[in-house]
Amino acid sequence: MEDYIVEMRNITKRFPGIVANDDVTIQVKRSEVFALLGENGAGKSTLMSILFGLYEPDKGEIYIRGNKVRFRSSNDATAHNIGMVHQHFKLVDNYTVAENIVLGIEPMNRALGILPYVDIKTANREISLLSQKYGLEVNPTDKIEDLPVSVRQRVEILKMLYREADILIFDEPTAVLTPQEIEFLLKIIDEMRKSGKTIILITHKIEEIKKIADRCAILHRGKLVAVLDVESTSSQDMANMMVGRMVEFAAVKQPPRYRETVLEVEHLSVRNANKFEVVKDVSFKIRGGEIFAIAGVAGNGQGEIADAITGMIQPHSGTIKLCGKDISGLSIRQRVEAGLSYIPEDRQGTGLFLDFNLDQNLCLRKYYKKPFANQHILNFSELESYAGILIDKYDIRSAQGIKTSLRSMSGGNQQKAIIAREIEEHAKLIIFVQPTRGLDIGAIEYIHKQILAEREKGVAILLISLELDEIMNLADTIGVLYNGEFLKIADASTMTSHDVGRYMMGVKGQ
Amino acid sequence: MKKVINKLASILDDKRWDSVSIPILSILLSFICISIILLVMGKDPLLAFKSFLQGSGFWPKEKYGGGNGMLTDLFSFLNILAPMILAALGFVVGFKAGFFNIGISGQMLSAGFLAAVIVGYSDLNAVIAKPLVIIIGALAGGLLGAFVGFLKHKFNIHEVVSTIMINYIISYLTGFFINGYYSDAITRSMKISGANARLTWTNVQIAGVKCNIPLGIVLAIAAAFVVKFIFDKTVFGFELKAVGSNMRCARYTGINVGRHIVISLTISGALAGLAGVTYYCGYLNTIVPRTLSSLGYDAIAVALLGNSSPIGAIFASFLITIFQTGSNYMSSTVGVAKEIASLITGILLLFSACGGYFRYLAHRRMQRIQDEWDIKDNPLRKIIADNSDERKEEHIHG
Ligand SMILES: Nc1ncnc2c1ncn2[C@@H]1O[C@H](COP(=O)(O)OP(=O)(O)OP(=O)(O)O)[C@@H](O)[C@H]1O
Ligand SMILES: [Mg+2]
């Protein structure tokens, strides 16, 4: 009993309409990697938020190093050397790396012996040392807003280490990373374990658990299903236990049946606010029934291509044709009505109104049209019954049905809501950007099936993803984007994932 | 005691009533808090509350001056209530679309001034003059609001900055004209109009007492229901809320965000303009140069107190206006400085901001009670709860 560093006993946490954690007991040993696996909405983030002092449990007790504790805020948890990297980062955008890390516990000094001020020089130095020690490279004076997500994550990790945390909670740290970055992060986690730290890792990717974790707890709809020894359990078993049924890993794909061209992009160039060309003279075509995947490391212009096609940003030059009609001059709504659907990358900022209820969010493409609106008056019963149908059809889980506020839904179910809404537009072209980021394997399996079903129907699909596996599984044609240019566009059957990976790193020619 | 609290929690946790029960609780708590303050000052709180009601015509005073009565006070209360509701509505419309229109005072002043200059000195028939005043008020306020929206949309100038500056410009500009052309020789203020253009019928005899009957109150209540209808039922209202909730997602949805920014601020300004004409050309019938009305700022507090809902704005205006109009009388009878009205507004606002917290507390309490019942009712559950440690141990080894 004594060698457990963290014990959460009989934790129950309710939210209106749902029991997010139902009598859950977990025990974590000193310096092990303890994984939490579970479907979207299973209650993983909630359980860890309780351990980190963000929520108080309705029932249950927490013991840290054998002592009973009661956390009223995350400060209490920090005082017990617990740190957490959240699913959605919590950094101040216009502060520097160092300022973010020391925020709240700034090293102070006194000018002329009296006036207190934040000694940012010392902070910078300390952080450089810390980042060298753990191999987490950051520049302490960079502003957060200028940094890519992987570096922001390093900042979050350093923030924990700076507070001398030795119980580290990672909530889906790999969802936002590229394969190389994941590799790197897992190595760091391994090193931290060796140096005596205890790590709790939430992830949906079973191969990561296999690679790094010692034990794994599985949650299903708020309840603890099992605590497993990772080494002696197969991936398939873990997946089945987590979803509660058999899971197929790779979707079955029919041979392609291409139809006429749906999307034609010619000489597209996009400049960012600093007049820098982020998309350079890109041309490609997508036929009906074809999945065209854009592969590439994050930040190589993928998002801008999608935004330009949908009208979210104005391209600098080039034309975009949908079914032979130039849509470059059309408004966003006109493009949608011309037959374009869009699952954006930033689901919370762009794809959803977090403060609106689920039914309204499901009807964002329809609310102003008959029969949902008549003479500018909304018809709520139509909206609600339509939303109800989508919830059933796409198995969107929420605490209070169509009247759930989006903010309270788990990340995976938010994504499902967007996908349901956009697929149900029955568009000619659907753009999927990172459609399965942060989803559990059951949901991924489901969404891949949906994407393939749309392909069978003859819809043209533009898939933008950072997951090489996803691209290799689904794509008919692959375009590899590097520095805003296509290095290679080829039939998917002619490339191995190794080839694609090499192009992604900017290696030209064979 | 515990029983009472549990009962209270069950009332507050009832979803059907919480939009009424929570504000009532907040108001009661503020009253208790105010009473304590009055007690500490050595005054009788009951007497104070009574004289607030007396001052605003909801409770008979001991004696009245010649020709006046309780109705006189009540109507004068309604006279100030009307612009308060309209101004609060103006703020609500902007706020729902995501804007903080603090230019209401300026919009009111320009509307009142223009209506006075154009119609106030004319000898148009009242049947034409009164509607004209209303229309000019809405137009003047609306145009100013549209200008703010335009600056926001085209040049991304924050509405708080532009409205503050416009407030000053209006104040000095109208002040210049009033001092130069329209000022009354004795009061140095703007004398507005003859009875034809005034939005209040003065000295009407009702039940033997003199009353000033405001037209604006009808306008204000009607406007509240129109605003409610727009936000609750129409496509346009839904889109305004969408813009206010997340501009980026509104764009993604296909809403013409720029147009909605301008329109929402136009409506907000138009309502403020209506408040302006009912205030300057109805209630007061005079404009003091270079002075912005504090009502335009109080309306912001009122709108927030009303949970930024149009119907809430009516009730909140009612409450706050009782304290503001009654404060003069209260101060003369109880002997507390009338500035206590502002203190009361502040306390009310403070407690109403805690509404969400009260709801949370009530909900948690009900959950706890539920848990206790579960265990008491069901001996099996208790055993499971006690033994679950061992149960989980098994999982680990199994
Ligand atoms: N603040 C909240 N208010 C109301 N309900 C909530 C809140 N936070 C979470 N929930 C609900 O609790 C359940 C568990 O959510 P949680 O975020 O813990 O899931 P998760 O396992 O982390 O899922 P995901 O993998 O999608 O991130 C969900 O059904 C969610 O809707
Ligand atoms: Mg989560």
Image (cartoon, coloured by chain):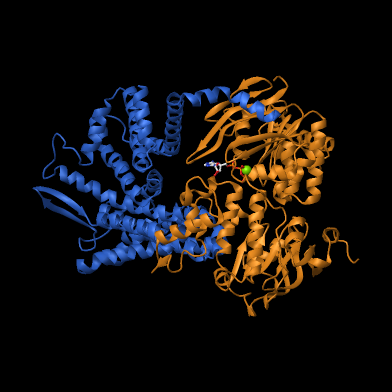
Chain colours: A orange, B blue
Q: Residue furthest left?
A: B208
Q: Residue furthest right?
A: A510
Q: Is residue A361 above or below residue A89?
A: below
Q: Is residue A492 above or below residue B183?
A: below
Judged from the image, the quadrant occupied by ligand 2 is top right
Task: For residue A244, say whether it is visible.
Answer: yes
A213 or B270, nearer to the observer: A213
- Does B267 sit left or right of B392 as displayed? left
Name the spot of residue A101 as percent of width and height, x first: 71, 37
Which residue occupies 61% across, 46% down? Answer: A40
- Where does the C terminus of chain A fall, quadrant-wise? bottom right
A415 or B96, nearer to the observer: A415
Q: Residue A244's quadrant in the figure? A: top right
Task: For residue B123, say whether it is visible.
Answer: no
Q: Residue furthest bottom?
A: A324
Name the spot of residue B369 as percent of width and height, x first: 42, 28
Q: Is residue B11 above or below residue A263?
A: above
Name the spot of residue B108 as percent of width and height, x first: 37, 56
- Does A305 sit left or right of B20 as displayed? right
Which residue occupies 46% across, 50% down? Answer: A403
Name the spot of residue A435 as percent of width and height, x first: 66, 57
- Where does the N terminus of chain A fall, quadrant-wise? top right
- Marker count (numbered): 0
Which residue occupies 33% across, 37% down? Answer: B24
Q: Residue B70's quadrant in the figure? A: top left
- Does B59 sit left or right of A407 as displayed? left
Which residue occupies 81% across, 36% down? Answer: A190
